[in-house]
Image (cartoon, helix red, strand yellow):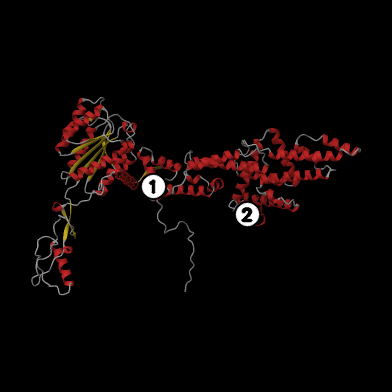
């Protein structure tokens, strides 16, 4: 028999997990799109703000703010000349201890030694070089000088290889020999790589012998291949170079001299020079020699200062990536390891969630790239319409609005071919065959019941029979009755006319008009599919709009509010549906200022010309003859607009509304439902 082992699935995302829910992200992005923002800009703004809702994630702006705070904290950490200051202090202490030992001695040797100490150069590195062969008379001075040399050796090596301070704390001569061997092996490995001969096995052998110098095995920063090792060493070498560049010329010369002296004394000068040249050649992009300002007061050693400068360089690179303000910027440019080092695990999770939004919006079919441009898909537009409709209904307080239940279709509807159990108050026609069949089946199942069918003694459903049944009769009960299901014979021809002129943007009503359009279209197509809806946008000309086009539509930077042309298109839509109930809804913030001339060209005039008003009102009269009631939703209270819509109401009998922009959808949807209920 086969044996099976079970464990956690590790080959990627859980294939049985539910799809990633990006609908809230799409809704937040959709609000910006409806206001006129391009989809790619809306997505970028969403990623900068972060995910909405309780389980949301921080956006790029929050991560960027943390990075900048971290950079400020690092700059305030201390000064870069701490090692120089400490070296001078130890040197002065050693010289003072030696003078104290020499002073009581009246001999000539003591005076010669004092003279030698008096002629030491001011430069610390040169003074240390002069004293390297000095025979100290004071044991305390010799110990202090040895401590100075150990300090310089550990600081300088720590500047090149982070963690060397700890590795050299024991002052074991074999430790320095091992460092020499490591650097020689490292340079040989780099040479082999330059010739194309390096393999991963070479690196693993190197790490097996010297890996403890580059972090513990469970350290996430421990390099896993030669490229990661080179990157780590190059960043640190570049930080050391920036440290020298950030000092004054005198300090730079003094510290460089100290570092050279340490390398020569340790026998590492040649290997370190070879390594530095290789690292600079491999990573010339790391800003070698670029000065960095540190504003703190505490003195930092060379190793700590190098660590701070390396981290500042990483943060500067991370800040640029999180800013996403360069051509072709994508979230994939952000280094997760840099985020983890700078901001922690939670920030990596936040970044992963933001990346997933961008990927899932495309994978789940809400966004598509066409000719390099990000666009909303029809699926996304449907989602935006559903969201807009849901927001509208959340404001409606009437008990049954929105579901629009049909309870009294009666015999005016077409039979659907199905039936259902009778309920009190039903006016649908009785399904006699199913009713009697139910009674027969029930009677057969009752013991001792007669087999023939009779009629109940009372005419009302559920009244039962009067007296004992005749031979072969079947008694009818309330549960036996069924009625035919019916549906309406007629639908509605709905025309929504939306002003697209630039004044809609200036008044801040553009997004509300688009959201209202999507909400009404969603309501009609989902709840009342038998209705025929047409969306007509108008400015200098009018045109029919598809919902997908409406979501990303920009306003028209043209002059003219051509309601005359819009009513002509709406009239043709109503004429194509002569048996439908006509509903015309007009959303505008201005009176008509343009009309179509006989040659088909638009003519603009402001204030509105008499010809524009006459032709527009003629189309209103045609709507009246079609029995189409026109309801106006005014988004402004200009005197001319009020006068015009009052004249339309007088001629047509329609109603006039003046809603706030944020309640436009509520007014339009409610009016559509009211008109539709009125057809009963």
Check disc 1 and report the residue beneath it. Answer: 24
Tell me if residue 308 comes above or below residue 475 in the rendering.
above
One can see residue 452 in this view: yes
The percent coordinates of residue 63 (x first, y second) are: 50, 43
Local secondary structure at mark 1: helix
Local secondary structure at mark 2: loop
The residue at the far right in this view is 107
Quarter-of-image position of residue 318 = top right
Check contact, mark 1 vs mark 2: CB within 8 A.
no
Tell me if residue 365 comes above or below residue 618 in the rendering.
below
User: Going by the image, does 291 lie left or right of 253?
Assistant: left
One can see residue 370 in this view: no
Check disc 2 and report the residue beneath it. Answer: 216
The percent coordinates of residue 452 (x first, y second) are: 10, 71
The residue at the far front in this view is 467
User: Going by the image, does 499 lie left or right of 83?
Assistant: left
Q: Which mark is residue 370?
A: none
Tell me if residue 483 comes above or below residue 101 in the rendering.
below
Q: Closest to the observer: 574 or 100? A: 100
User: Going by the image, does 640 lie left or right of 143?
Assistant: left
Quarter-of-image position of residue 676 = top left
The percent coordinates of residue 113 (x first, y second) are: 86, 38
Crowding near pointer 1: few (<14 within 10 Å), some, many (20+)? Answer: some
Q: Identify the residue at image location x=26%, y=39%.
A: 667
The percent coordinates of residue 130 (x first, y second) are: 80, 39
Q: Closest to the observer: 169 or 103? A: 103
Tell me if residue 450 comes above or below residue 215 in the rendering.
below
């Amino acid at each position: 028999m086969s044996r099976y082992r079970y464990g956690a699935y590790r080959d990627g995302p859980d294939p049985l997990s539910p799809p990633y829910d990006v609908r809230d992200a799409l809704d937040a992005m959709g609000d910006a799109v409806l206001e006129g923002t391009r989809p790619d800009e809306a997505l970028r703004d969403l990623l900068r703000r972060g995910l909405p809702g309780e389980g949301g994630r921080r956006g790029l702006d929050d991560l960027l703010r943390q990075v900048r705070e971290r950079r400020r904290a690092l700059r305030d950490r201390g000064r870069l000349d701490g090692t120089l200051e400490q070296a001078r202090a130890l040197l002065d202490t050693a010289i003072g201890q030696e003078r104290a030992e020499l002073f009581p001695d009246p001999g000539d040797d003591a005076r010669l030694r004092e003279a030698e100490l008096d002629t030491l150069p001011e430069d610390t590195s040169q003074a240390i070089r002069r004293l390297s062969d000095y025979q100290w008379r004071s044991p305390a001075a010799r110990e202090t000088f040895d401590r100075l040399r150990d300090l310089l050796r550990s600081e300088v090596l720590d500047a090149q290889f982070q963690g060397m301070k700890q590795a050299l704390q024991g002052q074991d001569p074999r430790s320095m020999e091992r460092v020499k061997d490591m650097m020689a092996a490292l340079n040989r490995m780099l040479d082999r790589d330059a010739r194309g001969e390096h393999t991963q096995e070479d690196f693993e052998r190197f790490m097996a012998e010297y890996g403890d110098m580059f972090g513990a095995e469970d350290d996430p920063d421990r390099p896993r291949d030669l490229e990661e090792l080179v990157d780590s060493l190059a960043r640190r070498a570049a930080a050391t170079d920036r440290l020298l560049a950030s000092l004054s010329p005198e300090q730079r010369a003094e510290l460089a001299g100290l570092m050279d002296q340490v390398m020569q004394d340790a026998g590492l000068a040649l290997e370190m020079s070879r390594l530095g040249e290789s690292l600079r050649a491999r990573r010339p992009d790391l800003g070698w020699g670029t000065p960095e300002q540190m504003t703190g007061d505490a003195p930092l050693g060379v190793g700590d200062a190098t660590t701070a400068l390396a981290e500042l360089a990483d943060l500067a690179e991370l800040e640029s990536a999180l800013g996403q303000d360069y051509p072709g910027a994508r979230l994939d440019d952000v280094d997760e390891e840099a985020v983890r080092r700078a901001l922690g695990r939670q920030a990596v999770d936040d970044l992963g969630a933001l990346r997933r939004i961008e990927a899932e919006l495309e994978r789940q079919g809400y966004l598509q790239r066409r000719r390099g441009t990000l666009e909303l898909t029809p699926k996304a537009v449907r989602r935006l319409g559903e969201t807009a409709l849901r927001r509208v209904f959340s404001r409606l307080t009437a008990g049954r609005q929105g579901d629009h239940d049909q309870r009294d279709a009666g015999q005016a509807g077409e039979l659907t071919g199905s039936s259902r159990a009778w309920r009190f108050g039903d006016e649908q026609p009785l399904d006699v065959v199913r009713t009697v069949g139910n009674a027969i089946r029930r009677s057969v199942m009752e013991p001792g019941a007669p087999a023939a069918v009779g009629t109940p003694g009372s005419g009302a459903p559920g009244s039962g029979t009067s007296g004992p049944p005749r031979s072969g009769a079947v008694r009818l009960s309330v549960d036996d009755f069924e009625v035919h299901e019916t549906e309406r014979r007629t639908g509605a021809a709905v025309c929504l006319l939306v002003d697209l002129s630039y004044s809609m943007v200036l008044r801040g009503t553009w997004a509300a008009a688009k959201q209202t359009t999507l909400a009404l279209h969603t309501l009609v197509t989902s709840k009342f599919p038998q209705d025929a809806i047409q969306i007509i946008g108008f400015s200098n000309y009018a045109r029919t709009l598809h919902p997908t086009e409406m979501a990303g539509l920009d306003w028209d930077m043209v002059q003219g509010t051509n309601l005359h042309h819009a009513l002509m298109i709406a009239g043709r839509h109503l004429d194509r549906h002569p048996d439908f109930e006509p509903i015309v809804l007009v959303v505008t913030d201005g009176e008509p200022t343009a009309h179509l001339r006989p040659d088909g060209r638009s003519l603009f005039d402001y204030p509105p010309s008499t010809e524009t008003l006459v032709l527009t009102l003629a189309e209103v009269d045609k709507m009246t003859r079609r029995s189409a009631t026109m309801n106006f939703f005014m988004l402004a209270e200009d005197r001319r607009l009020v006068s015009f819509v009052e004249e339309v109401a007088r001629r047509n009998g329609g109603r006039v509304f003046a809603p706030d922009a944020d309640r436009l959808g509520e007014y339009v949807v409610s009016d559509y439902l009211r008109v539709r209920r009125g057809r009963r």
